[in-house]
Image (spheres, rainbow, N blue to C red):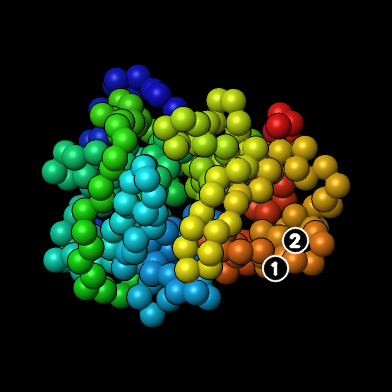
C-alpha cells in the first residue's frame, strides 16, 4: 500500500493530469455507478436518513452521521454543486480526499470516514467513483463543519502511490479488497478501541460498534468465523442484501441493505470467502 517515493510522485502526476472537466468514459461511469450503488454505498453516510432509511431525493447531499460524546460529524455534500458540493474540486482533489483524507485547503478529514481503508482503493476504482459523482444531479446542501472532542490524526500517512486491485480470481484476496478499501465492512464491524476508532489490529471483524439514529440503537455483528459459524453462505448473502437475519428478524440500519442488494453474486461470494478466512474473534 505504501509504495516508493518515485511511484507516489508518478501517481500524483497522473492524477493531477485529470481535470475536473475531463470527459469520463461510459465504462468508468458504469463501474462507478456499480461501486457506489452496490458495494461502496457512500450514500449510506452521505445521503440524508429518515426513520425508514435514506432519502434518495437528496442522494449524496450530506447529513449528520454521528453525534456522540466523541464527536459531532457531518458527511459532506458529494454532489457536483459548486457552492456546497464537489463542483469546484478537481478529480485529483476528490481522489486525494478519499484515499489520503486531505481536503484541497490542506485540512485533514477525521473519523468515521475510513481513510485508513480507502488508502488501498485501486486507481481505477477511485477514478470510476469520481466519474460517477460527476454524473449525479447537483443538490445545494450546506452543512456545518464537524466537531471533534478527541484528538484526530494529524495525517493518515504518506501520499498514496499507484494502487491496483487484486485479481478477482483470488476470491479471498479480492473479497478482502471489497470488504476493506471499497465497502469498508471492517470499519463498522470491528470493535472500537479506546479512541472510538475500530481496532483493526486486535478486533478485526469482531463487531460491537454502536450506532444511534432515527431507527434507535443498533450494534454491528461479529463477522468472523465465531459469529458466522452456523450461518450458510446463502444466509449471509440474504442478511447483507435484504437485511434479514438467520432467524428471520429484520435487521436495523445503518447497514446499507438497499445498496448491497445490487451486488453481483461474484462479488458477494468473494466477500463471504474473505469473511470465512478471518481469524476467529
Q: Quadrant of the N terminus?
A: top left
Quadrant assignment, res 268 = bottom right
The residue positioned 51% from the left and 43% from the top of the image is 187
Can you tell which mark lies on residue 22? none
Above or below, 77 against 59 in this view is: above
Q: Residue at x 55, y 25 (%)?
A: 201
Whole-percent x, y for residue 75 in the image: 33, 57
Q: Which residue is mark 1?
A: 250
In the displayed structure, does residue 224 sit left or right of residue 139? right
Q: Reply above or below: 163 against 228.
A: above
Tell me if residue 165 comes above or below residue 221 in the rendering. above
How far is mark 1 from mark 2, CA to CA?
Answer: 6 Å
- Is residue 169 visible in the rendered image? The answer is no
Say what secondary structure mark 2 lies in: loop
Residue 122 at x, y percent in the picture: 45, 41
Give the quadrant of residue 190: top right
Q: Is residue 101 left or right of residue 217?
A: left
* Most distant residue in the bottom direction: 57
Q: Earlier in the sequence, mark 1 or mark 2?
A: 2
Q: Which is nearer the eye, 144 or 59?
A: 144
The residue closer to the viewer here, 89 or 26, is 89
Q: Residue at x 39, y 40 (%)?
A: 115
Q: Which residue is mark 2?
A: 245
**Residue placed most toward the observer, 63 or 19:** 63
- Residue 237 falls left or right of residue 55: right
Give x and y (percent) for residue 117.
46, 38
Of 16 and 50, nearer the camera is 50
Side (left or right) of 207 relative to 156: right
Q: Which residue is at a point 66% across and 59% down the rendered structure image?
A: 240
Amino acid at each position: 500500500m505504501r509504495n516508493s517515493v518515485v511511484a507516489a510522485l508518478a501517481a500524483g502526476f497522473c492524477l493531477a493530469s485529470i481535470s475536473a472537466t475531463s470527459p469520463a468514459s461510459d465504462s468508468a461511469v458504469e463501474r462507478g455507478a456499480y461501486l457506489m450503488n452496490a458495494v461502496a454505498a457512500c450514500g449510506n453516510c452521505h445521503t440524508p436518513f429518515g426513520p425508514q432509511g435514506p432519502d434518495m431525493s437528496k442522494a449524496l447531499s450530506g447529513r449528520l452521521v454521528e453525534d456522540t460524546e466523541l464527536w459531532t460529524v457531518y458527511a459532506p455534500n458529494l454532489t457536483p454543486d459548486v457552492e456546497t458540493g464537489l463542483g469546484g474540486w478537481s478529480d485529483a482533489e476528490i481522489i486525494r480526499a478519499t484515499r489520503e483524507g486531505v481536503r484541497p485547503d490542506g485540512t485533514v478529514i477525521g473519523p468515521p470516514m475510513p481513510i485508513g481503508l480507502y488508502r488501498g482503493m485501486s486507481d481505477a476504482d477511485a477514478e470510476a467513483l469520481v466519474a460517477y459523482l460527476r454524473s449525479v444531479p447537483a443538490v445545494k446542501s450546506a452543512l456545518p463543519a464537524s466537531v471533534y472532542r478527541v484528538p484526530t490524526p494529524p495525517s493518515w500517512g504518506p501520499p498514496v502511490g499507484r494502487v491496483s486491485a487484486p485479481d478477482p480470481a483470488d476470491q479471498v484476496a479480492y473479497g478482502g479488497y471489497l470488504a476493506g478499501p471499497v465497502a469498508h465492512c471492517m470499519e463498522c464491524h470491528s470493535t472500537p478501541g479506546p479512541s472510538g476508532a475500530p481496532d483493526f489490529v486486535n478486533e478485526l471483524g469482531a463487531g460491537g460498534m454502536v450506532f444511534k439514529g432515527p431507527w434507535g440503537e443498533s450494534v454491528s455483528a461479529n463477522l468472523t468465523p465465531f459469529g458466522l459459524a452456523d450461518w450458510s453462505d446463502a444466509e449471509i448473502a440474504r442478511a447483507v442484501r435484504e437485511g434479514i437475519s438467520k432467524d428471520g428478524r429484520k435487521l436495523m440500519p445503518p447497514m446499507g441493505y438497499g445498496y448491497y442488494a445490487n451486488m453481483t453474486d461474484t462479488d458477494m461470494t468473494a466477500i463471504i470467502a474473505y469473511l470465512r478466512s478471518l481469524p476467529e474473534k
